[in-house]
Amino acid sequence: MRQVSFSRYGGPDVLTIREASRRPLAEGDVAVAVRAAGVNFADVMARMGLYPDAPKPPLVLGYEVAGVVDAIGPGVTEFQPGDRVIALTRFGGYATHVVVSAAYVFPCPAGIADTAAASLPVNYLTASLALNRLANLAPGETVLIHGAGGGVGVAAIQLARLRQARIIGTASTAKHDTLRSFGVDHLIDSRDPNSAHLTAEVKRLTGNRGADVILDPVGGKSFETSYRLLAPLGRMVIYGVSAVAPGKRRNWWRAGRAILQLPRFKPMSLMNRNRGVFGLNLAHLWDEREQLRDAMRPLLHDLEAGRLRPVIAAAFPLERAADAHEYLQSRVNIGKVLLTC
């Protein structure tokens, strides 16, 4: 089989194709012939050496795939060779074949394209856990979605609409018309360096009250600004620190600066202001198999029913993984970036 791997940290050019042997199937394993694999910002940070959970190189990236079962290990009864499936991989997904525990494999709804299926696990699980489980977004509440044009951002827009929430999004101005067509009520330029403008706009749009729910994957000063924008009983979910990787190569000065700018949320402030801050890292839920499966079931149901429609920004052949990373880091994408086999 073929894999995309890297043996040293660096820019997208460190990603190379290699031939590898598939590991033998153990009890409960499923082998999947990959047709599409998701590209996520966590992959970018791992490639740059800025993702502390990633194993050291040489490493094959990739958290999610869609494809066809081509073999099953002992004890697997819910899948058979030929079944179309979606799988969480926790590294290893940039490949023509993966072997993964059946606990992280899900049936692909009929009629759903492989690219759409591969867009579901990471982005929609993250958005669903943030909005539905942690923040418990209610109808009529206002949600502020930072990075509304990204994979998680678009997923959050669709889920927030299902909850009948009012949506404010931040994105570069080139994305605003498209995001309005997705149902975002108000948009703010994310590339405006003046955080006072964001604060003023959110206050204006909410009658000086603030947002009920805020999703923030940016980090740095953004977390502090978002916290100040929470309404009474507001909930903020932080699920990334993209500010540590503004360029295509690792820059310790910029990364360190972004880390140092992270606020410390003080218990007395949280109590007195009636606010909540949640952290979310999907990779750290890997052992929570039942919770992940419980969260995936309604997403699969909504996908099959057409209530969720993954937006594909671009799909690159596996051999062009470096181009996919370049594209994702350019931050021009609206929706999901994928690799195809």
Image (cartoon, rainbow, N blue to C red):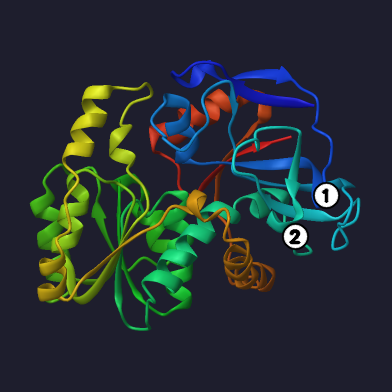
Mark 2 residue crowding within 10 angstroms, few (<14) / some (14–19) / many (20+): many
Q: Which residue is mark 1?
A: 27
Give how far across and how far down residue 115 sits, in percent.
Answer: 67, 48
* Image location (x, y in percent) of residue 226: 20, 58
Three-letter amino acid code of the residue under disc 1: Glu
Report the Cα–Cα distance between label 2 and label 1. 22 Å
> Which of labels 2 and 1 is toward the front?
1
Q: What residue would you read off at disc 2?
A: 108
Which label belongs to residue 16? none
Residue in view at x 28 percent, y 38 percent: 243
Instruction: Determine the residue positioned at 61% across, 73% down.
Output: 298
Asked whether the viewer can see residue 150, the reply is: yes
Is 184 displayed left or right of 104 in the figure? left
Report if residue 182 is visible in the image: no
Q: Quadrant of the C terminus?
A: top right
| Residue in the foreground of this view, choosing between 305 and 21 | 21
**Dot 1 crowding, Cα within 10 Å, few <14, some 14–19, many 20+:** few
Amino acid marked by disc 2 = Cys
Q: Nearer the viewer, residue 176 or 224?
A: 224
Q: Residue at x 51, y 25 (%)?
A: 56
- Closer-to-camera residue (279/128): 279
